[in-house]
Image: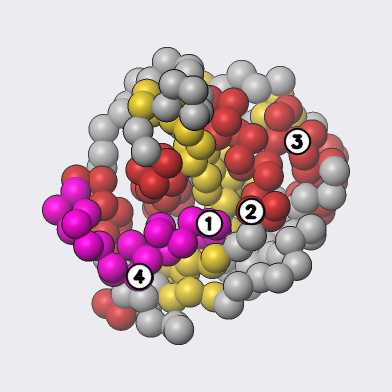
């Protein structure tokens, strides 16, 4: 199962069975973990993303408070913002990791009733830009750091937060052994914050 979007060579890697260590992308690629989280009690939703390169270099973390929405759309917002940031930063080879099968199906082109959805259309547009994007299905435990980032943003004012250094909530999980080479790099560079990032009022879809 390699063909997802033939127009721009979007492809899916095999499922990763080992989740407790960082799996780097191929040289020249960047890798992104995305996640969406919804609070069951009040449906408060948020998404988050973490992008780094094959040498464990941290590139960007971001989160977005979404108000109330289903978890699928929270996940899709994470994909949308990941594509937006990777493209704007000049990266042209991107691996997106998600544990959501529905998201993988949509990125494969199985839009179903969401064919005319504005968010899905925006994602489809970005996937057809001149770059290589690959989708990797991973297990839930493999993305605890970005899950914590998304959960921490639920209930915050609606909008996107871009972190200029690694949030403490993410770094604490990295130290437990998830993406350990990345954690060592961040410790050396002292790129750790208590969670304060720059808040963007931009909520629109590009």
Select label 2 or label 1 by which is in front. 2
The Cα atoms of the two marked residues, 2 and 3, are separated by: 18 Å
- Taking the spot 61% from the left edge, 19% from the top edge, the residue there is 196
The Cα atoms of the two marked residues, 2 and 1, are separated by: 8 Å
Please state if 177 lies on the left or on the right of 18 as rendered.
right
Over which residues does the magenta segment extend? 96-117
Q: What element carries label 4?
A: loop
- Taking the spot 30% from the left edge, 54% from the top edge, the residue there is 123
Magenta segment: does it hold 113?
yes
Q: Quadrant of residue 197?
A: top right
**Disc sitting over residue 140 in the figure:** 2
Q: Reading the chain from its start, which is encountered first: label 1 or label 3?
A: 1
Task: Depth check: give the residue in front, 32 or 19.
Answer: 19
Q: Do the residues labelled 2 and 1 touch (CB within 8 Å)?
A: no
Q: Is mark 1 on a helix, strand or loop?
A: strand
Q: How crowded is mark 4: few (under 14 residues within 10 Å), some or many (20 or more)?
A: some
> Label 3: which residue?
171
Q: Position of residue 107 (x, y in %)?
A: 36, 64
Task: Depth check: give the residue in front, 153 or 197.
Answer: 153
- Taking the spot 37% from the left edge, 66% from the top edge, the residue there is 105
Please state if 124 lies on the left or on the right of 90 as rendered.
left
Magenta segment: does it hold 26?
no
Please state if 21 lies on the left or on the right of 166 as rendered.
right
């Amino acid at each position: 199962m390699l063909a997802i979007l033939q127009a721009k060579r979007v492809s899916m890697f095999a499922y990763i069975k080992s989740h407790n260590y960082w799996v780097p992308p191929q040289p020249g690629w960047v890798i992104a973990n995305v996640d969406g989280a919804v609070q069951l009690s009040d449906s408060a939703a948020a998404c988050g993303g973490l992008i780094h390169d094959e040498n464990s270099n941290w590139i960007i973390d971001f989160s977005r408070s979404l108000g109330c929405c289903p978890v699928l759309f929270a996940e899709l917002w994470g994909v949308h913002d990941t594509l937006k940031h990777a493209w704007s930063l000049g990266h042209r080879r991107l691996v997106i990791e998600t544990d959501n099968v529905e998201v993988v199906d949509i990125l494969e082109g199985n839009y179903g009733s969401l064919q005319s959805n504005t968010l899905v259309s925006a994602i489809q547009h970005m996937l057809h830009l001149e770059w290589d994007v690959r989708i990797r299905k991973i297990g839930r435990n493999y993305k605890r750091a970005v899950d914590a980032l998304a959960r921490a943003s639920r209930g915050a004012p609606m909008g996107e937060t871009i972190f200029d250094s690694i949030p403490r909530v993410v770094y604490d999980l990295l130290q437990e052994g998830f993406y350990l080479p990345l954690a060592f790099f961040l410790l050396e560079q002292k790129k750790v914050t208590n969670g304060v990032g720059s808040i963007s009022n931009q909520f629109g879809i590009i």
